[in-house]
Amino acid sequence: MSFLRASFRAHAVVANARRYSTTPETKKASNIPLYLGGVGVVGLAAYLYLEKGAPAAVKKVQEKSPLDPDRFVNFKLKKVEPYNHNTAKYTFELPANEASLLPITSCVVVKSSADAPAPLVDAKGKPIIRPYTPISPSDLEGELTFLIKRYDQGKMSKHIHDLKPGETLAIKGPIMKFPYKANEFEQVGLIAGGTGITPMYQLLNHALSDKSNKTKFTLVFANMTPKDILLKEEFDSLKKKYPDTFNVIYIVDKPDSEWKGPTGYINKDLVKQHIPPSSLGQKVKVFVCGPPGQVNALAGNKDGMKQGELSGVLKELGYTEDQVFKF
């Protein structure tokens, strides 16, 4: 770099000498400025090359997900981050720093890996398989993260909570849920309870970050206590960042002395107050996810992998089966 600076300095000296000279020059013009100018051009090119670096190599486009929808693949647990008193984030390592490429909205199913010390099976000896929705973006490279609550009677949640970094979990997917399309609806209502929030977060985090998004989203999220509200900081941040297209209402069954929001269960009045009305027809969609009792009261039980008949609060408020989707 000292050579480059010297060449620039020499060029500047010559230029300044000619600029401030008061005596007409009578001698034959020197070629030094020409030589220095040439050196300056070469030096400038070298300087820019060193400063900017060589042209970046074109990154190869990832065409296939490391996940497989037809078979279980073992993924290594990379880290565990405690979230609250009974929930933690579990991040699994994806090979070759690839992204999961999971569609919005979709989930995966998991089971204990074959090399687990004690394979997780039911009373009949069959593997226990459970669905989970990742909370990490589908284009995040090298990682797949789940937010998992430990239930006393939940065999899979207890199994995952007992995993240590370096151990593996068998994962298969994706399993498509709803074929989301940007701006398909003018308004979307989301009603969630407990860990049923993860599909809603996956959808909202994706849709709101889309600069072309015009859909207005309203989330009503029910929990037992304020301590049980999952991803509250993330939703509050989304509300602050996208005030024109997102609103969130929290409701708890057992409030503490500092709670100022709604209390109790999600009822007809709360839905009428916050969820976009059925009168919007094809311009509105309502997504529901939560404990079976809550889903049944709001929209009726699912029929296995099928949606099942619409009933409950949403049916009473005039919504049709085309307007409601149960995760």
Image (cartoon, rainbow, N blue to C red):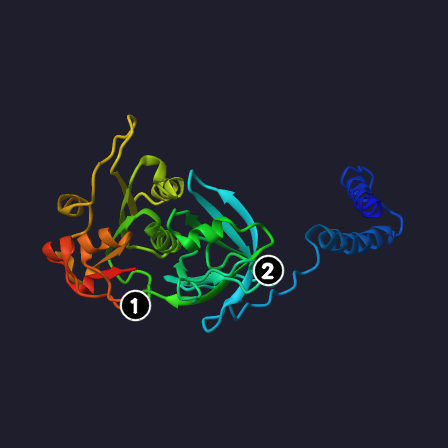
Label 2 with label 1: CB-CB less than 8 Å: no
- Residue 25: image location, x then y, percent: 84, 45
Q: Which residue is mark 1?
A: 305
Three-letter amino acid code at disc 2? Answer: Asn
Amino acid type shown at disc 1: Met
* Closer to the camera in the image, 226 or 184: 226
Q: Is residue 32 left or right of residue 295?
A: right
Nearest to N terminus: mark 2 or mark 1: 2
- Residue lying at 76% horizontally and 41% vertically, measured from the top left: 19
Task: Return the residue at label 2.
Answer: 97
Q: Residue at x 17, y 62 (%)?
A: 310
Closer to the camera, 192 or 207? 192
Q: Quadrant of residue 166?
A: bottom right
The relative height of residue 166 versus residue 282 in the rendered view (above or below) is: above
93 and 279: which is toward the camera: 93
Choose mark 2 or mark 1, whichever is in front: 1
Question: Is 183 displayed left or right of 157 in the figure?
Answer: left
* Extreme residue toward the right, this view: 27
- Secondary element under disc 1, as helix, strand or loop, is loop
Rounded to the nearest angstrom, the CA distance separating label 2 from label 1 is: 33 Å
Q: Residues within 10 Å of mark 1 (few under 14, many from 20)?
A: few
Percent x, y of residue 249: 26, 41
